[in-house]
């Protein structure tokens, strides 16, 4: 059969293949704004700088940190609290999360000068970097506190926990935000289950010059709540929770029902008994970042590989398919298999 013969069945086979291919197509990229492009590059540059420092310290791991972010930790260490997913930690390092944060901030209606409280564990240092970079890009007023314990593959390198990463990136000018205080994390958020790793975390906090607040869980919740709902006339416009620190989630199983991503007070009558629930009860919206796979699927960011920012299905693909279908049929002559 000659493909260029207008009566050739090969033309219809070709049409079928093209239509099947177009049916699978998605719009591959939404053009990033100038601000988003600049932010993406800044986060990538921060990762390059951290990776270079990791190489100097003999802590670089090109096998598990193939994108050379510097934020991927160890499968297990003395500062590890729980099991975590390597794929989730890799996904959290995609600079597109910084872009997504900007879009979330727009969704919350944030403007320059608005106050945001960031509560993070050490489990997703790459995500924390993106949140801080995005917040500073929008000139938000950020209050930060970090629970230093980390699940596997997070900031769980005893020689390079979050206080060291924070110091490196702040000294190199990638963000200016400085943690107000640290907690240990782990059981009770005061080092339970971490064992000998507590000393490594305490040393890192001491060398950073930032207070390590060691107290009961109730006292930790109370102090963090003072940041969220201070007795002064400061107004918190948003609480960002990254990871699964006990003070943020609480012990009530109702927290499991919370959706990842933007949470608005009017949508949740019951949200557990942690800081997330307390914030929502006070009318303060929350950006909850924990289950990266589901969040990536809803945000359009590839979970396991870095690709373009997916924003939906394209009208271009069906339009091209229709045009191709009409063109082939309009020029095709009837034929039979007996010819």
Image (tube, rainbow, N blue to C red):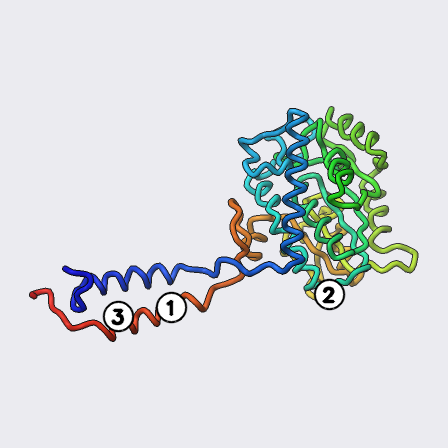
Residue identifier under label 1: 320
Picture residue at 64% right of the left edge, 34% below the top:
51
Badge 1 element: helix
Q: Of circles 2 and 1, which is in front?
A: 1
Quarter-wise, where is residue 52 in the image?
top right
Residue identifier under label 2: 109
Measuring from the top left, give residue 44's x and y in whole percent: 63, 44
Alpha-carbon span between mark 2 and mark 3: 49 Å
Image check: 122 left or right of 3? right
Measuring from the top left, give residue 168's x and y in whole percent: 74, 35
Measuring from the top left, give residue 147's x and y in whole percent: 75, 40
Between 4 and 10, the one nearer to me in the picture: 4
Q: Residues within 10 Å of mark 3 (few under 14, many from 20)?
A: some
User: Which labelled disc corresponds to residue 328?
Assistant: 3
Badge 2 element: loop
Q: Is residue 189 above or below residue 287?
A: above
Q: How many marks?
A: 3
């Amino acid at each position: 059969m000659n493909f260029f013969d207008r009566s050739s069945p090969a033309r219809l086979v070709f049409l079928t293949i093209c239509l099947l291919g177009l049916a699978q197509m998605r719009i591959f990229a939404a053009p990033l704004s100038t601000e988003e492009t600049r932010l993406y590059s800044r986060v990538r540059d921060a990762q390059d700088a951290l990776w270079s420092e990791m190489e100097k310290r003999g802590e670089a791991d090109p096998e598990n940190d193939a994108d050379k972010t510097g934020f991927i930790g160890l499968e297990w260490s003395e500062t590890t609290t729980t099991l975590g997913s390597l794929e989730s930690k890799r996904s959290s390092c995609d600079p597109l999360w910084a872009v997504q944060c900007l879009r979330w901030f727009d969704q919350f209606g944030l403007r320059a000068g608005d106050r945001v409280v960031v509560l993070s564990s050490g489990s997703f240092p790459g995500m924390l970097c993106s949140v801080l970079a995005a917040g500073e890009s929008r000139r938000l007023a950020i209050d930060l506190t970090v629970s230093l314990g980390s699940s596997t593959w997070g900031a769980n390198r005893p020689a390079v926990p979050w206080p060291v990463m924070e110091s490196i990136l702040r000294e190199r000018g990638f963000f200016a935000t400085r943690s107000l205080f640290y907690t240990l994390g782990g059981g009770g958020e005061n080092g339970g289950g971490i064992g000998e790793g507590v000393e490594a975390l305490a040393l890192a906090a001491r060398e950073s010059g930032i207070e390590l607040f060691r107290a009961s869980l109730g006292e930790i919740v109370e102090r963090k709540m003072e940041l969220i709902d201070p007795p002064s006339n400061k107004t918190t416009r948003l609480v960002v929770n990254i990871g699964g620190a006990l003070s943020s989630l609480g012990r009530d199983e109702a927290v499991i029902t919370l959706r990842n991503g933007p949470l608005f007070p009017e949508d949740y009558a019951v949200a557990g008994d942690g800081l997330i629930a307390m914030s929502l009860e006070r009318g303060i919206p929350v950006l909850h970042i924990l289950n990266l796979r589901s969040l990536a699927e809803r945000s359009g960011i590839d979970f396991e590989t870095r690709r373009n920012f997916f924003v939906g299905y394209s009208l271009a693909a069906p339009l091209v398919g229709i045009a191709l279908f009409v063109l082939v049929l309009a020029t095709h002559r009837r034929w039979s298999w007996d010819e």
